[in-house]
Image (spheres, rainbow, N blue to C red):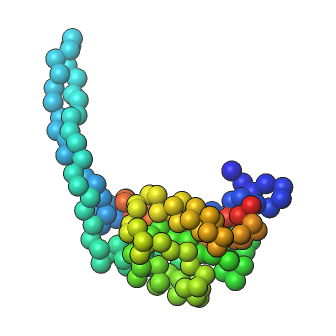
Amino acid sequence: AEGGGDGVGILGSSAHSNGLGYEELKCGYLGSERLVATPGEGIVLSKGSYDGMSMNGKEVYKFATREVPKVIKEALVAADMEVEDVDWLLLHQANIRIIETVANRLGMPMEKVITNLAKYGNTSAGSIPLALDEAVRSGQVKKGDVIACAGFGAGLSWGSAILKWG
């Protein structure tokens, strides 16, 4: 949903995916094909489960610190905004070094970064909404604040949304 008439909501966004990064961060499939007897030649079905998560931490760090600042800038362009217009930076709570490096590359002080990583650790796909909820409930984020959010994950995939809180 786009921002409403009062200017709150999603002001701009950008997202990417590159399957060539699959080996760096993935949850592999442990399936096997089996032939099921049916009229005719039969049908091949796949049965299996997923392996545990695997990650090449060094490569994921390099990827995130290179691509996340870019995707935030793309979302800011879509919102017709600059980094200086952002009140808060809210990133996927994966690693404090990634968060600090991205903030630095954007020229944002850590005082403008929302993080709860030290409290909860990496809560995966829930990290951005959990940190945002906590920041709103505590009064840190106020009505009218502009928040640059960005996340990344398996595949590799990454994206950003610029929000005006209402």
Q: Residue at x 25, y 52 (%)?
A: 28
Left or right: 19, with 29 as reference point = right
Q: Residue at x 61, y 81 (%)?
A: 112
Q: Residue at x 27, y 71 (%)?
A: 56
In the displayed structure, 79 sits above or below 1; it is below
The quadrant holding residue 57 is bottom left
Q: Nearer the viewer, residue 145 or 108?
A: 145
The reply to whether residue 32 is in sight is yes
The quadrant holding residue 79 is bottom right
x, y percent for residue 138: 61, 69
In the displayed structure, 151 sits above or below 61; it is above
Q: Residue at x 71, y 64 (%)?
A: 165
x, y percent for residue 49: 22, 42
Q: Nearer the viewer, residue 144 or 160?
A: 144
Give the total of numbered labels: 0
The reply to whether residue 63 is in sight is no
The quadrant holding residue 140 is bottom right
Left or right: 160, with 77 as reference point = left
x, y percent for residue 113: 56, 79
In the displayed structure, 50 sits above or below 62; it is above
x, y percent for residue 131: 53, 66
Left or right: 111, with 119 as reference point = right
In the displayed structure, 78 sits above or below 1; it is below
Left or right: 74, with 11 as reference point = left
